[in-house]
Amino acid sequence: MGYQVVVTDYDYKDVNVERELMQKHGIELITAQCRTEEEVIQAAREADGILNQYAPITKQVIEQLDHCKVIARYGVGVNTIDVDKATRKGIIVSNVTDYCLDEVSDHSLALLLALARKITILDQAVKHHNWDVTVAKPVFRLKDRILGLVGFGNIPQALARKAKQLGFQILAYDPFIPLSTASTLGVQLVQFEELFRRSDFISVHLPLNQNTKGLIGHNAFQIMKKDAFLINTSRGPVINESALIQALTEKKIAGAALDVVEEEPISHQNPLLEMDNVILTPHAAYYSEQSQIELKSKSAQNIIDVLSGYYPDYIVNPSIKSTVKLQNKSSYM
């Protein structure tokens, strides 16, 4: 086939899964570790396809891609890619929306339980020779508490199923989800403000875009319950971090558990690191050995599909089908 695919950057041990799949189709895989637009342009200018993790695929980069037919992102979010520019350039953008549903929903639930049962506070007390349950007061029974889900796509739907088994009442805010989807899961769809006002735990599951950046800020924290907790396993910038720090400092909310923050890795000067009522994990919710293999193989398959003349299973810009004519995979499955 003679196609060439460039991996702009990756933090995995290797790309053997991707390379093996592409070799079966005669596709050459070239790896790089780009950090800047200029580095991406230099590495991928002649590429027929691009595999991308964190490197910026901006308008300026895409303007220089004269051979590229597909940009595949490792992951769900595509905030590293200028999707509109790619669409205008005739480039299909793909992601993988379902590779870590269990991992992220499990991680969100684990953070929720750690907050609810004050696990980290009790752990630190015991390790400092303080065998005293009262350091964790107050702790409340989970049954009949209210869990609010900001966003109600595949991951929060999986979380809702699991939290239901613990007796939670569940609210969700998502203007793009039909009422029937929520009703089937026994979840009540509500407006943004109502969710923040009523919930005891709020778990955030939003993509990062111009509409969601900083969406959760001072106003949201003003109407939250003082004993409510915030959990974020989506993208850091959807929360106004300075507003969150202020709310935690002024005890307007009880605490937070964050797998993502505005600046990653987190700055050593970030006040969140010094707060006893905050749990932090290093953007790890997606991870399991199984999910990594699934992500790598599905990301590679998206590129193989396009270069083989088929629409991929996961396509971010479906409107491109009006200008880029490929076959549907069902025609050869």
Image (tube, rainbow, N blue to C red):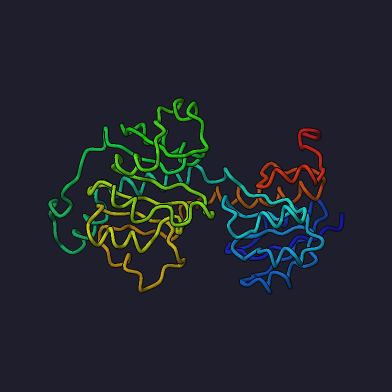
Quadrant where the N terminus sits is bottom right
Judging depth in this view, the residue of 34 and 197 nearest the camera is: 197
Q: Identify the residue at image location x=81%, y=42%.
A: 326
Q: Is residue 172 above or below residue 246?
A: above
Q: Is residue 319 above or below residue 70?
A: above
Residue placed furthest toward the right:
1
Q: Is residue 11 left or right of residue 173?
A: right
Question: Which quadrant of the figure has residue 267?
Answer: bottom left
Q: Is residue 231 above or below residue 141?
A: below
Judging depth in this view, the residue of 302 and 38 nearest the camera is: 38
Q: Identify the residue at image location x=25%, y=61%.
A: 276
Where residue 158 sits: x, y (%)? Answer: 46, 37
Numbered marks: total: 0
Q: Identify the residue at image location x=44%, y=57%.
A: 214
Q: Is residue 170 left or right of residue 157?
A: left
Q: Is residue 144 above or below residue 68?
A: above
Quadrant where the C terminus sits is top right
Where residue 29 sits: x, y (%)? Answer: 75, 61
Where residue 207 sits: x, y (%)? Answer: 52, 50
Where residue 125 sits: x, y (%)? Answer: 19, 59
Q: Identify the residue at image location x=39%, y=53%.
A: 216
Question: Which quadrant of the figure has residue 6?
Answer: bottom right
Q: Is residue 33 left or right of residue 258?
A: right
